[in-house]
Amino acid sequence: MVKLFPVKTGLTETILRRTPDQVHAVEDVSFQVMKNETLAVVGESGSGKSTLGLTTLRLLDPTSGKIWFDGQDISTTPESSLRSVRRHMQIVFQDPSSSLDPRQSVFNSVAEPLGAAEDTGAARKKELVAEALKAVGLSESQMKLFPHQFSGGQRQRIAIARAVILRPKLIVLDEPTSALDTSVQSQILLLLQKLQKDFSLSYMFITHNISIANYLADRIAVMYLGKMVEVASTSELIDNPLHPYTRILVSSVLEPGSTTGLKDVEVRGEIPSNIHPPTGCRFNTRCPYAKEKCSTEEPEQREVRPAHFVSCHFAEEIAAGVNN
Amino acid sequence: MSLLTPEEMSLKVQNLTVRYKTGKGVLSAVDSVDLELVKGKIYALVGESGCGKSTLGLSIPRLLPEDQVEYSGKIIYKGTDILSLDEDGLERVRGSEFASIFQEPLTSLNPVYRVGEQIAEALSVRASRQGYYTGGPVQKPSAAKRLFGFGTDSLKGYSSNLRRFFPRVYDLLEEVWIPSPRRVAEMYPHELSGGMRQRVMIAIALAGSPEFLIADEPTTALDVTTQIQILKLIKKINKEFEMGVLLITHDLGVVAAVADYALVMYAGRIVEEAPKDELMQNPLHPYTQGLISSFPKGRKKDYTLTSIPGTVPPLGMYPSGCRFHPRCPRALAGCPTQVPPIVEVSKGHRVACLLYGGA
């Protein structure tokens, strides 16, 4: 089981004045990913979802806060000691063309984690790579080929093979299907489903695509400008969105076969900068329900319905349709 | 200016083939395509990467590099074949009849000019084409003037030629739902968000008062909430100006939201076309069926997503006969050898598949 608590990451931008500007990429975020579960982290640009994924794996260091993995606090563990934990946490990136070394054969790329984690003999390595390739729908005979000889979807499979070869517990997937064609996207989603079952994996699935989150995730966490505004089970969140931002996001989803066309979604304004985010609730500048309190006081994350957490001062009133 | 009926104003693409001259020989990206765009309607051209939809979209205003491309067939518009026009003739068609907007506005907008000026330039070009006096050729302020900037008078930096268009510039910015048009007109493209930039592009397109808008993946690079705003804008323009729209996209959700009519492309050919609702509810071609069912529409506990096996064939490696046959779950014996003819199954619903006749 993976547990995380307040993770505050500020990435320092340029130092043009005396106090350096900071990009408030992720601010005060707490969440958990349970064993065998898929948590989708959903958000638009500047939401901090990618930063969150990278920091969870300590690929970026948190500015403050704690990260627990399997009962162990790994927030400040030095790199050298992280190795033994790292084999249980892996990542798959969005662009399979840049995440695979074009000068390494498929075998070398997929085998790379083996070298980092433990001493494996050559024969055993070959066996494990073949197994991993088979698990992702590729063939042992393709081991000697190079990434450019494969299609985008196949390259993503190679990246996934590399991520599962050590049988990790948690895989962070950062927009793994966004760069792929639609027909290939579903192939990869089905593959991920199968692997999760076969290897008892936990996924932290970062995406801007709510249709995919709705399909694949057990729970969904919504991020806006560095803050986690709502977390709930998939059906709860999609059928009963409580945060005004989530409501807009869910109604912005376009699906084939829908006969409602462009629904009466009122999307106001644009996403503000995360170097100087709005005061109080970060969504207040665009929220149709905003009151004075919203621009002065940051809302706490509260359990408004069972296992349904929202950061909004007026979540209950909005849900009841009272607040207008 | 004669008043033509919508039918006479339509664009008819007839048996169009577009071939690229590549290192691997001359490869056809668009193969024997017929299509008709009627003014005032929104057509979605759907397909995955490499299917030829962008090539088709760029062919209509002939925006492809002429020395690398070979055309055959016809593109008839207002009685003229666009493929037979010379540069002068094309200048009259581009912008004034067909305006294009693309996926990444940052590469379409000039980074060193303020957006208001770029819109004004489009207006100026249109005015000069229509024979209105524009005060001679457009004069930009000298480099020195530009470098040292100006005071608070926002119009000081522009030549008198362009100044006269600024009231209309502000109108257009308002038309595309940009708040504070006077302020935004003074900004440079990099100072605007993706959604704003795309709206500026649409404003530039509107400046020419075109009959048709060709939009190639206009919302793909934008956030989901911004996408809705832009699609609403395109719909508004379509309605308000009776502008025909060719919307090129890979996203079936976008098609469902805005299209009147949808055309599905695969490996250079149109495989199916129908009014949007008909296509979504009654897809006939196995590729269309696969595409629609591979779009996640529910939860994993309730149903299993399906997918189309295999991958899209790259340019130059298209299978013989029906190009989809190696991936088709319903392929017939004749599919690898016969190119399926287009069959009209019901009004407006056409499909190129041996399952529906033509064998």
Image (cartoon, helix red, strand yellow):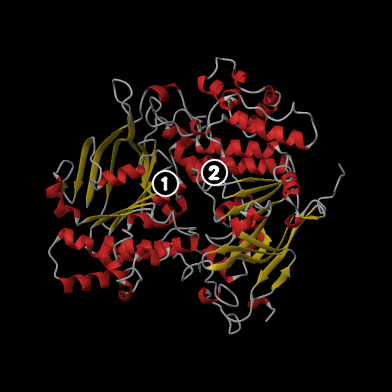
Residue A36, percent from left and from top? 28, 58
The residue lying toward the viewer, choosing from A218 and B209, is B209
The numbered dot on residue B227 is: 2
Q: Is B140 on the left-hand or right-hand side of B135?
A: left
| Circle 1 residue | A237
The residue lying toward the viewer, choosing from A61 and B109, is B109
Q: Amino acid at mark 2?
A: Gln
User: Which subunit holds the residue at mark 2?
Assistant: B
Q: How many marks?
A: 2
Picture quarter with the N terminus of chain B: top right
Q: CA distance from mark 2 to mark 1?
A: 22 Å
For the point 57% across and 60% down, which residue is it? B47
Q: Is A157 on the left-hand or right-hand side of A132?
A: right
Residue B113 in sight from this viewpoint: yes
Q: Is A323 on the left-hand or right-hand side of B180?
A: left
The residue lying toward the viewer, choosing from B210 and A186, is B210
Residue A190 in sight from this viewpoint: no
Residue A51, percent from left and from top? 32, 42
Picture quarter with the C terminus of chain B: bottom right
* Mark 1 crowdedness (10 Å alpha carbons): few <14, some 14-19, many ≥20: many
The residue lying toward the viewer, choosing from A268 and B157, is B157
User: Which subunit holds the residue at mark 1?
Assistant: A
Q: Residue furthest right?
A: B2
Q: Quadrant of residue A203?
A: bottom left
Mark 2 on the same chain as mark 1: no
The numbered dot on residue B238 is: none
In the rendered view, tell whether residue A282 sits above or below residue B3.
above
Residue A273, percent from left and from top? 42, 31
Q: Is B154 on the left-hand or right-hand side of A318?
A: right
